[in-house]
Image (spheres, rainbow, N blue to C red):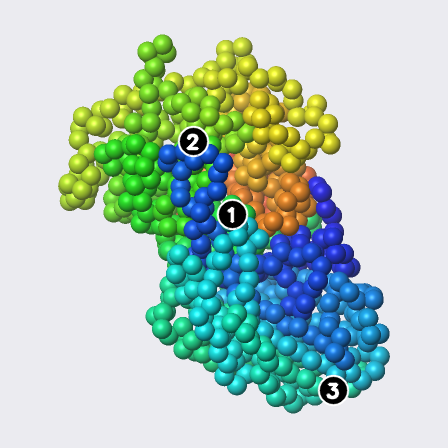
Amino acid sequence: MNQDYIKPDNWSIIEEGFNAERVKSSESLFSIGNGAMGQRANFEESYSGETFQGSYIAGVYYPDKTRVGWWKNGYPEYFAKVLNAPNWIGINVFINNEPLDLNTCKEISDFKRELNMQEGWYKRTFKATLPNTNKVEVAITRFLSLDIDEVGAISYTVKVVNHDAVVKFVPYLDSGITNEDSNWDDKFWNTTRVDTSENRAFIESHTMKTNFKVCTFMQANVVYKANEISVVKGESSETFISAIIEQEVEKGEEITLYKFGGYTVSTNHESGKLQEAANIALDKASTLGFHKLLEKQKNAWASIWEMSDISILGDVKAQQAIRFNIFQLNQTYLGTDSRLNIGPKGFTGEKYGGSTYWDTEAYCIPFYMATKDQQVARKLLKYRYNHLEKAIENAQKLGFVKGAALYPMVTMNGEECHNEWEITFEEIHRNGAIAFAIYNYYRYTGDYSYIQEMGLEVLIGIARFWQQRATYSSAKEKYVILGVTGPNEYENNVNNNWYTNYIAKWCLEFTAAQLRKVKEEYAEEYTRIINKTAVSDAEIKEWKTVAQNMYFPYSKEHNVYLQQDGFLDKELIKVSNLDTSQRPINQKWSWDRILRSPYIKQADILQGFYFFENHFTQEELENHFDFYEPFTVHESSLSPCVHSIQAAKLGRMEQAYNFYLRTSRLDLDDYNKEVEEGLHITSMAGTWMSIVEGFGGMRIQENTLSFMPQIPEQWSSYSFKINFRNTIITVTVNTKETSFSILGNQEVNILVNHKKVLLIPGEVVKVSN
């Protein structure tokens, strides 16, 4: 860990004491979102210290022109930027004309932030002495409504402490913002209209190039001694508009500003009616008022937690961590809009660009399948089907033909928009994760309709890509896949990455099997698909030939598959022999040195063993885990969770627990020294997996749920719920036994430690561990 200032708490993230050096880290950690928009935890009032300002709108992006030193054919023309949206949260505060700015205050005490995850709100309190010696106590509460997802709400209270003072609030909107992350310092937004009406204000703007039209809006009300204070128009410019509320406040009294604000977007409304839509949203919010809207927020989060919570007894830090991860996942994506996906930073930062990586299929879909209605996961799969034509275009740009599909590594709209050569061209294993997610969805839900209606077309495009991407090696008399990057991004442009070759082989075989199944069981759909894709028996035979003759590098000396052909040519120095001053190596070493090292960024072969564990024996897993884990630096957020699951499967619970802490507290404790850039949202689903699949041992076996529960010695018990084929199953594990109960009307057979157990509604079944 690299930081340890977050106070342990079961339901809240808490920071006590003001420290300017951790402002940007806390802006990430205390971020809020509601699936439609989100914000870093920037101060509402002016702050002249170092800060990373960020407000974001789901699905709104800018195609920032690719910037590279040497252009290569096939490069994406742009890198999609998650846009810093116009600022609606701003409230400048003056005490006797002195600006409240925590960077210039004489003294700050009792500073506290709290992100209440149970109820979905963020609060900040402090006492401050300004340069003019005025003392104030301040309390701010902010949340983004789940009920009215275009609206956020702020309550900003100032108490005058040492003598009467004139308090002036200046709430404002500002579209003259910039991105923290930009290739060319382009202008991303163009403001077209600034307007005000009584206590409301509006800025209409649109993104350059993509032309998303947005109305940023606010309404301000101020209450002093139970009376509402009048609001007057403040300053305005081409990109800024404010209001002014000024009041003399008696010593010991409080004055509160209530501010509603947010965004209406042309993706959801007619372009010419965005201000009208903003007024409708404000009418709804103001009719309820701040406190009733907050009550609705608490109820909405209670409903989310009812299904998705994991309860841990005996380990507050572990409990806090898993709830933080679940909370952030739900803030980022709620499954209400199939046009959206789960960006790696969510609404907490701009790094990586794009909204969709292979992380969604490999890590997030299991979480959403089990904690929500299966339609949410289906929407994520439909998102890929909707982008199939773009995936075919992406492959065509690289020279592939006949409907071969290469899904992008990073995308906003189906086009590849990642401009690192070793990622864009080489990290082709993402195709495999999408195919695996289709299989995983069917395996878990039992819903085959997606495959016959949409998924088989996706699989055909992917299979065609793998067949064309493989090359027959006369020397090896096998098919090889050359010039790739696997999940371990610390090896670029390698030949025969085992994980890539294995998932390609599996994709080819799985697609052929699904074609056969649809032909036999859904003849009408089969005819439609064949007519649309022109798949022939000869082509399917080619797929099978490639799959059956795929090459996998193997070391007889070590009795393991090799990550890639040249892995044993490296100087195999274990991580334990690395000086800690050299970590993380991605911040200390040149890229050349990293590529020549044996060090593994994230699970690679072990990722394959995780997906396809039934293909390998426990002994094979143990051999590969023992060989590769000592070279793994876990500098990808996606690495520790897979290792935790595998360690638990091997019965190494102390190691599994340590990996769990690393994945769950990755951001809270800033393991990778980068939390100020934003949170690692997609890997948070892996944290959930490390408990449910790792400690709980949940799998699908014999077409039903299977559990092999274990418990870390640091815990006295843990429990979680699973929505399995529309039946809610509650699992509670303690040191002696595991209890199961179900909601619904149907009995369910499950496996526990390889033995059949019948679950009956209304009954609790206990099984000894």
- Tell me if residue 218 comes above or below residue 495 in the rendering: below
Q: Residues within 10 Å of mark 1 (few under 14, many from 20)?
A: some
For the residue marked with disc 1, what is the amino acid?
Asn
Q: Position of residue 244 (x, y in %)?
A: 63, 81
- Tell me if residue 715 comes above or below residue 585 in the rendering: below
Q: Earlier in the sequence, mark 1 or mark 3?
A: 1
Q: Position of residue 189 (x, y in %)?
A: 47, 62
Label 3: state its secondary structure: strand
- Tell me if residue 301 comes above or below residue 656 in the rendering: below
Q: Mark on residue 426?
A: 2
Q: Mark on residue 183?
A: 1
Distance in Å between CA atoms under marks 1 and 3: 47 Å
Residue placed most toward the observer, 700 or 27: 27
501 relative position to 187: left or right? left
For the residue marked with disc 3, what is the amino acid?
Glu
Residue placed most toward the observer, 349 or 537: 349
Q: Residue at x 40, y 22 (%)?
A: 482
Distance in Å between CA atoms under marks 3 and 2: 65 Å
Q: Mark on residue 248?
A: 3
Q: Residues within 10 Å of mark 3 (few under 14, many from 20)?
A: some
Q: Residues within 10 Å of mark 2 (few under 14, many from 20)?
A: some
Q: Earlier in the sequence, mark 3 or mark 2?
A: 3
